[in-house]
Image (tube, helix red, strand yellow):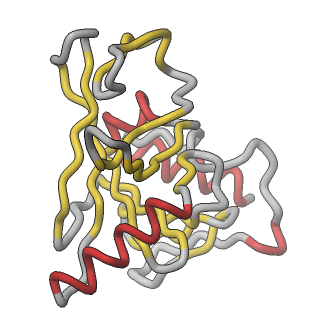
Amino acid sequence: MERKLLEVFRSRLSLSLSSSLSPSLNPGNTSLRSSGTPSLINGVLWRGIRRFCSATVEDISITDNCVIRLHEIIKEEGRDKMLRVSVEGGGCSGFQYVFALEDSSTVNDRIFEKNGAKVVVDDVSMGFLKGATVDYVEELIRASFMVTNNPNASGGCGCGSSFVAK
């Protein structure tokens, strides 16, 4: 019954849920409601179309360094900020990672959280980032957020800001 409801939900919203749900549904922990109340489906909290994922979902990993830096930024700014990670055409390898601090998200975003730090990814960029790790790295020449261990990248530039998609 729940699988049939998911298929109807998927077709009506034209969204691919397969990247957020594991192949087997656990009926004891899942529900699908047509009202505006949040629903828990395989550890993913759905509020309307917006998807809120804990960092335990294997879509994107967030390192402790990333969490620490985001908490520092929130403390400096005096208000909650989210790190938006997106992929755009450009860079020396074809695609580039873009990082921005934002106050809010959109309906088509996935929000990943680890220890109160939030990373936001739009649906299109998620196709390029699934399985990757978001990190904060401090080196002699720079300190910045980075995407590492991206299984969707077959190569990239030396600085790690751009990549070749598989």
Quarter of the image where the N terminus is located: bottom right
Residue sitting at x 18%, y 53%: 100
Q: Is residue 52 left or right of residue 23?
A: left
Q: Position of residue 157 (x, y in %)?
A: 33, 14
Q: Nearer the viewer, residue 94 or 135?
A: 135
Instruction: Compare residues 63 and 103 and report the one nearer the observer.
Output: 63
How far across and down, in percent of the image, does residue 119 sit? 38, 60
- Residue visible at 65% across and 48% down? 58
Q: Residue at x 60, y 53 (%)?
A: 6
Whether 45 is drawn above or below 129: the answer is below
On the image, the x and y values in percent for residue 87 come to: 27, 32
Foreground residue, 9 or 124? Answer: 124
Decide: is 41 above or below 81. above
Q: What is the total number of numbered labels drawn onto the structure image?
A: 0
Residue 104 in which image quadrant? bottom left
Give the x, y percent position of residue 23.
Answer: 76, 42
Q: Is residue 3 above or below residue 68?
A: above
The image quarter containing residue 77 is bottom left
Q: Residue at x 59, y 69 (%)?
A: 32
Relative to 66, 3 lies left or right: right
